[in-house]
Image: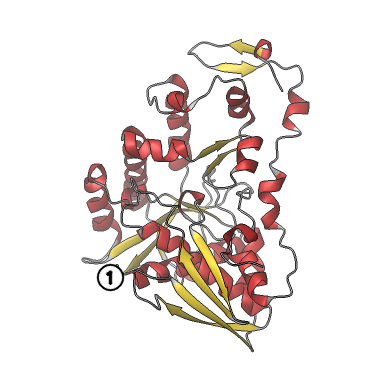
Amino acid sequence: MPNRRRFLKIVGGGTILAATGVAGFLATRTPHRALAPWRPEPYGDPRKAALSYAILAPNPHNLQPWLVELIGQNTVRIHRDTDRELPATDPYHRQLYIGLGAFIETMVLAAGAQGFQVRIEYLPDGEGGSVAEAVFVSGGNADPLSDQILKRHSNKEAFTAQRLSDTDMSTLGDYADLIADAGDVAQVKELTKRAFEIEMRTPRTLKESVDLMRIGKAEINANPDGIEMRDPMLETLRLTGLLDNETLMDVDHPGNKAFLRGYFEILDATPHYAVITTARNTRRDQLDAGRQLMRLYLKTTEMGLGLHPVSQALQEYPEMETEYALAHELLASPGHTVQMLLRLGYGPEPIATPRWPLETRILNDA
């Protein structure tokens, strides 16, 4: 483990790791155990096989809010894990249900690739019960999008200035509403920056994120959920005790100011946006929005495009009310709900995010 003598102070209160030994340190920092679910093992039970892909679905703050119950020989009951919630930024669990919808769609696609249909019943016991019940029956057909499940990752980097062709815009128009006009893009860009800063400067919403930060290999492997930070500099600071949660909560700390500037640069590097809206905002609508989100992700992956959620302005807490109202004015028809707002463009190859193994998500696994 690096020690404090390997650190040099720099202007502004930051620190850097001395050059000696850096290459060896970096070479060992990939959290392989936390990334193992991206290499699914074969299962004899088609339900487990499909679920091993479903756990890779996108979800808010990577909470992975799903639990599953295997019933009989062909049924899966899907539950929301109520220990995995975002009370500050998602008080009504809307975002969590979108993540559960993405989980359902991924399961259905993976089952189809195995030759199974899945009959889904939402909320079989009402809103107070399970999220959905899925019955697997033989006779399904593979959807070409299923080929992209293991390649799909959120791209949280700066996009290039390259714009989508008219043909690509037309293709993606079947999956989401697209924003391409330069003036509209500029408005949404400023909205996403203001909303992100509000979340950072609201103590309880910032704390929700800080508490879920997993910094470096050891933390990510120990808790393969939440907000992974695989940056070797941050990991080194964490390992030596120079980066704690109190520091991360200090928005005016030079390091946090630098982070905000860097993140704004990423938000500025956005040529297009994709938007998913629904006419109503019921749990069924939220689940359907999640299924649509997953298909959008897979289609953009197939096309070599990057997709990155920037939905802070859609969060439902008092400090975000103004931006929430503006987001709906800009992005939705009157009375409709904006469920997802995402950056869209060409970017560098994204990386996989950690996942809990499937066995930890099954309530009654033998």
Screen quadrant of the N terminus: top right
Total numbered badges shown on the rendered structure:
1
Q: Quadrant of residue 366?
A: bottom right
Q: Nearer the viewer, residue 41 or 141?
A: 41
How packed is label 1: few (under 14 Cα within 10 Å), some, or many (20 or more)? few
Do we see residue 344 in this rendering? yes
Which residue does the image show at 28% across and 53% down from the upper left? 327
Q: Amino acid at mark 1?
A: Arg
- Residue labelled with disc 1: 280
Q: Nearer the viewer, residue 56 or 239?
A: 239
**Residue 217 percent coordinates (x, y):** 66, 37
Which residue does the image show at 34% across and 65% down from the upper left? 277
Q: Quadrant of residue 157?
A: top right
Do we see residue 169 in this rendering? no
Q: Nearer the viewer, residue 127 or 275?
A: 127
Q: Is residue 328 left or right of residue 109?
A: left
Q: Is residue 182 left or right of residue 262?
A: left
Q: Name the image colouring.
A: secondary structure
Q: Check the image and report above or below for 268 versus 238.
A: below
**Residue 342 percent coordinates (x, y):** 44, 54
Q: Secondary structure at mark 1?
A: loop
Which residue does the image show at 39% across and 75% down from the upper left? 123
**Residue 140 percent coordinates (x, y):** 62, 85
Which residue does the image show at 57% across and 16% down from the upper left? 15
Q: Check the image and report above or below for 155 versus 141.
A: above
